Image: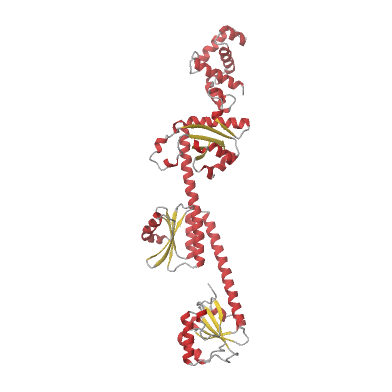
C-alpha cells in the first residue's frame, strides 16, 4: 500500500498542519504534484497530493469552490498550501471550500520546500514497495516449502496468506481440496465453469462472480496438459501482490500435479511392462483398458542396461513413447522396433546395453531372455550395444555367458545334487564323447566297464529326459561343455 496523508503529517521534519479533513487522513498518496495552475486537473491522474503557493490564485468564494470541486472530482488525495510565499496564511475561502467539499487541506510552512514533501513520499513509496516485495518473497518461500509436502499444503498456505477461500479441483472438475472446509459448498456453482474451461480448445482462465464474491479460476498443468483447476475467491478482487502470490501457487501446483501424474503413469506403465515380460498378462487383456494406447506398436524390441548406470533413462524424454521400468537390477525398455529403443538407451547412459527381438507381444518372455543374453555379451566384450540378432543362435550361443551357465546348471541339477556328483558328471561326459561305446568310455575314465554301466544307469534314473534321445543327449553335451569353460 502507498503512504497515507497521515504518514506525512506524522513526519516531524516536514512541519505539516492539517486544516480540514481530519477523518480523511487515511487516504493513500500515490505521488506529489506541484502546480500553480488555476486548473491542474488535466495533468493529474488521481491519488496525488497537490502542492501550490497560490501565486496565480486570488479568487473569491466561488473561485475557491470551483477550484476545490475540480480537485475532488479528479480524485486527488489532498491539497497542500505553502504559506509565506504569495499568501501569509491559507485563504479563508479555500479553507471553507475544502471543508465543505471533503478535501483534506494541509498547511505547508515556509521553511519546508515542496521538494522535501515529494522526496518523503518517494521514500515512503520505496519503503512500502520494498516491504511488499519482502513479504511477497517470504510468502512465496512458504508456498515453495509447502509444495514439498504436496498440493493440498500449497492450497492451505495460499488461503492463509490471502485470507480468503481456495478450492482445488481435479482435471474433470471434481473437488479435491477446500480451504476452509466450509468453502466446499462454493464448488457446486463453479463446476459448470470448470467444465467449460476444460472443454475449451485453448487453455484459458476465468473471472466470475458467485454469491457476491469475486472468483478467479485458473487451469493447472504444464505444456498444455490440464491436471486440475484452482479457484480463489473473496469479498474483494485481488491486488497486485496477491495476484503475484496466486501466480506463484499456480506454478507450484502445476509442477506438483504434473509430477504426481507422471509418477502415477510411470508406475502403472512399469507394472504393465513387468507383467508383459513375465507372461503374467497378454496384450489382449489390456484391449479395453486405459493403458492400451500407451503400448508401442508391434513389432517391438526389448533393451536392457544395468540399473546402477541406467536409472537416468527412467525419466528421459527420449523414451517417452516406450515403457520403461526397473526389474531385477536392470533398466528394461520396451519400444517399437521403428524407434530403436536400444540405440536411444545407449545414447542416454553410454552402455553397455543389450537388445532382444523384434517380436510380437506374445513372445516377450523369450525376447527378455534374448536381451539378458545380449547384455551379458556387451558386459563381457566391453562394447556399448549388443543385439541378440548379432549373437550365435540357439543353445550354442549361450556358451560362455552367465545365462548359458544358469541353463546348464538347471539341466544338470539332478546330478549336482547327488553325493557322487563328480563321478557321475565325468562318466556322462566320457559316455557322450565316445558316442555310447562302453569300452572306449571306460578306458577314458580308467574304470571297469561294469562300474561305468552302474554309473550310467544311476544317471538315467536321476535325469528326467531320455538318454537315448539324440536331442536330449546334445543338450547334455553342450551343457557339460558350457560348464567346462567357466
Quadrant in which the C terminus is drawn: top right
Residue 173 in sight in this render: no
Camera-side residue of 320 and 313: 320
Residue 483, x across and y down, in percent = 59, 22
447 over 283 or under it: above or below: above
Viewer-closest of 466 and 103: 103
How far from the left and from the top, in percent, is residue 254? 49, 54
The residue at 55%/80% (across/down) is 33
Nearest the camera: 328 or 192? 192
Q: Using the rendered image of the protein, determine whether residue 359 is visible from the camera's viewpoint.
A: yes
- Image coordinates for residue 167, horizontal then vertical, percent: 43, 59
Query: Vertical placement of 236 versus 446: above or below?
Result: below
What colour scheme does the image use? secondary structure
At x 49%, y 42%, the residue is 321
Measuring from the top left, give residue 360's x and y in whole percent: 45, 32
For the image, the number of numbered tags is 0
Up/down of 461 relative to 20, above or below = above
Along the horizontal axis of the image, is 13 left or right of 5? Answer: right
Measured along the vertical axis of the image, is residue 440 above or below residue 284?
above
Residue at the image point whose x is 48% and y is 92% from the top: 61
In this view, the residue in front, 86 or 263, is 86
Amino acid at each position: 500500500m502507498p503512504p497515507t496523508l497521515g504518514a506525512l503529517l506524522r513526519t516531524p521534519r516536514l512541519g505539516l498542519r492539517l486544516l480540514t479533513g481530519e477523518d480523511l487522513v487515511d487516504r493513500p498518496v500515490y505521488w506529489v504534484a506541484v502546480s500553480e495552475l488555476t486548473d491542474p486537473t488535466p495533468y493529474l491522474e488521481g491519488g496525488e497530493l497537490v502542492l501550490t503557493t497560490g501565486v496565480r490564485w486570488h479568487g473569491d468564494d466561488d473561485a475557491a469552490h470551483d477550484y476545490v470541486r475540480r480537485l475532488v472530482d479528479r480524485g486527488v488525495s489532498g491539497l497542500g498550501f505553502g504559506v509565506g510565499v504569495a499568501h501569509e496564511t491559507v485563504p479563508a475561502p479555500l479553507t471553507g471550500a475544502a471543508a465543505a467539499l471533503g478535501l483534506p487541506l494541509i498547511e505547508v510552512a515556509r521553511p519546508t520546500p515542496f521538494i522535501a514533501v515529494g522526496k518523503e513520499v518517494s521514500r515512503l513509496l520505496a519503503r512500502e514497495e520494498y516491504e511488499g516485495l519482502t513479504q511477497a518473497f517470504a510468502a512465496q518461500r512458504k508456498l515453495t516449502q509447502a509444495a514439498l509436502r504436496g498440493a493440498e499444503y500449497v492450497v492451505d498456505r495460499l488461503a492463509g496468506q490471502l485470507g480468503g477461500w481456495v478450492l482445488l479441483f481435479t482435471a474433470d472438475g471434481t473437488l479435491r481440496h477446500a480451504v476452509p472446509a466450509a468453502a466446499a459448498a462454493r464448488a457446486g456453482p463453479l463446476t459448470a465453469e470448470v467444465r467449460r474451461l476444460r472443454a475449451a480448445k485453448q487453455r484459458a482462465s476465468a473471472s466470475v462472480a458467485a454469491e457476491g464474491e469475486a472468483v478467479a479460476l485458473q487451469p493447472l498443468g504444464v505444456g498444455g496438459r490440464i491436471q486440475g483447476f484452482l479457484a480463489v475467491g473473496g469479498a474483494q478482487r485481488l491486488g497486485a501482490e496477491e495476484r503475484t502470490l496466486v501466480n506463484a501457487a499456480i506454478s507450484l501446483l502445476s509442477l506438483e500435479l504434473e509430477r504426481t501424474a507422471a509418477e502415477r503413469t510411470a508406475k502403472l506403465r512399469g507394472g504393465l511392462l513387468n507383467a508383459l515380460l513375465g507372461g503374467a498378462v497378454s496384450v489382449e487383456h489390456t484391449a479395453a483398458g486405459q493403458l492400451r494406447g500407451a503400448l508401442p506398436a508391434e513389432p517391438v524390441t526389448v533393451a536392457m542396461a544395468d540399473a546402477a548406470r541406467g536409472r537416468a533413462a527412467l525419466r528421459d524424454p527420449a523414451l517417452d513413447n516406450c515403457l520403461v521400468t526397473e526389474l531385477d537390477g536392470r533398466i528394461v525398455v520396451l519400444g517399437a522396433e521403428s524407434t530403436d529403443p536400444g540405440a536411444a538407451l545407449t545414447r542416454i547412459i553410454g552402455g553397455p546395453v543389450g537388445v532382444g527381438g523384434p517380436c510380437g507381444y506374445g513372445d516377450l518372455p523369450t525376447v527378455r531372455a534374448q536381451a539378458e543374453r545380449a547384455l551379458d555379451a556387451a558386459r563381457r566384450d566391453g562394447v556399448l550395444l549388443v543385439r541378440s540378432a548379432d549373437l550365435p543362435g540357439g543353445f550354442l550361443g549361450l556358451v560362455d555367458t552367465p545365462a548359458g551357465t544358469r541353463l546348464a546348471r538347471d539341466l544338470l541339477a539332478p546330478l549336482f545334487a547327488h553325493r557322487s556328483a563328480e563321478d557321475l558328471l565325468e562318466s556322462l561326459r566320457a559316455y557322450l564323447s565316445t558316442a555310447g561305446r562302453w569300452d572306449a568310455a571306460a578306458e577314458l575314465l580308467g574304470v571297469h566297464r561294469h562300474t561305468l554301466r552302474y554309473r550310467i544307469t544311476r544317471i538315467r534314473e536321476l535325469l528326467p529326459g531320455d538318454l537315448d534321445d539324440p536331442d536330449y543327449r546334445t543338450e547334455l553335451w553342450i551343457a557339460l561343455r558350457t560348464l567346462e569353460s567357466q
